[in-house]
Amino acid sequence: MSLVKLSYTEYEGTERHWEINKATFSNINLIVGKNSSGKSRLMSVFATLARLLSGQQQQLPYEPNKFVIELELNNQAFVYQLEIKNGSVFAEQLSIDNEIKLTRSENGSGKIRYEKEEKDLEFQLPLTVLAAVNRLDTIQHPFLMVLHQWAKSVVLYHFGTDFGKSQVMSITEAEVFFRNPAHPVFDDPNNLVAVYTAAFSQFGNPFDDAVIADMNALGYSLTAVGSENIQTIINFPVAALVMFTVEKELGFMNPQMQMSQGMFRALALVVHLNICAFSRKKQVILVDDIGEGLDYERAKDIINLLIHKAKTFDLQLIMTSNDRFVMNEVPLEYWSVLKRKGGIVKLFNAQNAAKQFNEFKYLGLNNFDFFASDLFEAEVVND
């Protein structure tokens, strides 16, 4: 497990105040909550912090906010705190096993631990950059590299969106990919054809075999999957690389734009999951609105596939849903229930609300009834 706790506050002390305090996580998590309870916002907050720490997002948020994240990395407790105001770093701190390794103030000055020299040294940085990113050094600050690599391992998939169905790949771009068989895996959750093409150029036929096997497990009887110039498949005015599948019952290439949205979403997620498995570069998988647009059986199967992949490849899985079918399929031990009162969001799970979770087991009701109950309302109002 990597993510242990997350707290976030924005616009503190104003009418726009919004916060989630000490949300706790396990290896496998299903976050449920009513519409507007903050599920997608929580995922976005987490993904934003990961992008900032990985250096993938360099522009700091302009709204005043605070992040506090607790991670378990290399059997050590990392606690990273970041406060941002008006697009500038107001405060930043990293501690490991309660020992401060990095700290800085609102004027950009701070201290950082030099491991090889076994002492703290002062530094000064521009207010618009993170010390955790701009002080990377494998010799003097190896702890920052650990944090950086973790942040790069976080990926967010918006299952309920287009998921890259309308995105194609130019032939010129495709030729570049195929000329370099060792091309690194392309990391873009919204561009499936480029992601798949890069993955196939690196992993080859075993990658296709894994994708086909997973799709078959979801009830899609495929004999082939790949990317191809759409003009060789159907009459189309522009040459472009697209994803295709061949279903056993049909026997011909079906391009991505002619797949059902449900099938394409399943294919996209399966491709991405197998990239995580083959590359071993992802550790935290965020899936927002899992099961959206799928029937009951497919939603159930894709949940089981996700949990199986997480356990097999030691991934931390965090999903969100308010779909009744999904909720009833995922064991209650993996649940986290979001409750919102005004701008205050609370997350309840078996770790911090063991009494309510244990009592519900003896009521003989299904999981959705637990979601719909008011068991946690008093805690949200009174805490």
Image (cartoon, rainbow, N blue to C red):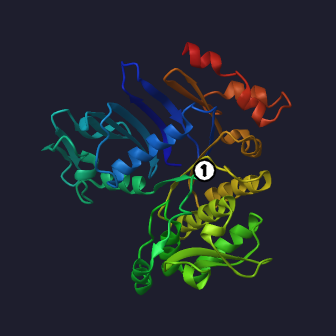
Q: Of the residues shown, which amino acid type is indicated by label 1?
A: Gly
Give the image location of residue 354, x and y in percent: 67, 28
Q: Nearer the viewer, residue 105 or 61?
A: 61
Left or right position of 125 against 150: left
Give the image location of residue 294, x and y in percent: 72, 53
Residue at the right extreme of this rendering: 364
Element on which disc 1 rests: loop
Please determine whether, in this image, residue 324 is positioned above or below residue 273.
Answer: above
Q: Quadrant of the C terminus?
A: top right
Left or right position of 204 against 362: left
Q: What residue did someone put label 1 on?
A: 160
Please determine whether, in this image, residue 379 is positioned above or below residue 80.
Answer: above
* Residue at left offset 56%, top offset 13%: 382
Residue at the top extreme of this rendering: 382
Give the image location of residue 255, x and y in percent: 62, 74
* Residue at left offset 44%, top offset 32%: 7
**Quadrant housing residue 108:** top left
- The total of numbered circles placed on residues is 1
* Residue at left offset 46%, top offset 36%: 6
Left or right position of 75 against 55: right
Give the image location of residue 205, x and y in percent: 60, 82
* Residue at left offset 71%, top offset 72%: 213
